[in-house]
Amino acid sequence: MPSASRQKAGREAETFALQYLQQQDLRLVTQNWLCKRGELDLVMLDGDTVVFVEVRYRRHAGWGGALESVDFRKREKLVLAAQLFLQQESHWADFPCRFDVIAINGDPGNAPSLNWIKNAFDS
């Protein structure tokens, strides 16, 4: 179970990512959407494209950086969660979709580095 400080850092990183994407003119559809297959951190609109955003945060790169933590199994879970989202929220089903990753490394309270990868993987 993650410690309270790790959960807090994760929430701060997600807020940082959301604010960054909103500055890039993306609009929030929903945040922390839960289903039996997992969670979608952010679902946003970029024009008419539904964007499923995975926010990954690592304070230290000792176990690999934030981007490296999005492995095949994680991508598979995200695709399944996105499919369930589109079934449940069917008004978005006919919109183009993509998967982005926001990789944040460093201290979330002290200017962490942010790397936004659009179209991070194929669905």
Image (cartoon, rainbow, N blue to C red):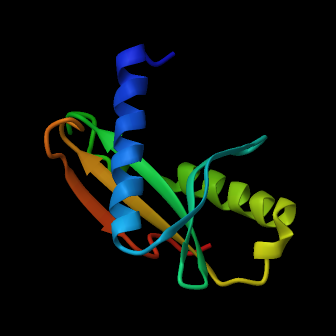
81 left or right, relative to 9: right
108 left or right, relative to 76: left
Residue 66 % position (x, y): 32, 47
Instruction: Identify the residue shown where x is 78% and y is 66%.
Output: 86
Residue 39 % position (x, y): 64, 45
Residue 8 % position (x, y): 39, 26
User: Outermost residue toward the left?
Assistant: 110
In the rendered image, the vertical position of residue 86 relative to residue 47, given as above or below = above
In the rendered image, the vertical position of residue 113 relative to residue 1, given as above or below = below
| The C terminus lies in quadrant | bottom right
Total residue callouts? 0
Q: Can residue 69 be seen by looking at this rendering?
A: no
Q: Quadrant of residue 64?
A: top left
Residue 55 % position (x, y): 43, 50
Instruction: Identify the residue shown where x is 43% and y is 25%.
Output: 7
Q: Quadrant of residue 117?
A: bottom left
40 left or right, relative to 63: right
**Closer-to-camera residue (100/74):** 100
**Closer-to-camera residue (72/49):** 49
Instruction: Identify the residue shown where x is 62% and y is 55%.
Output: 78
In the rendered image, the vertical position of residue 112 relative to residue 72, given as above or below = above
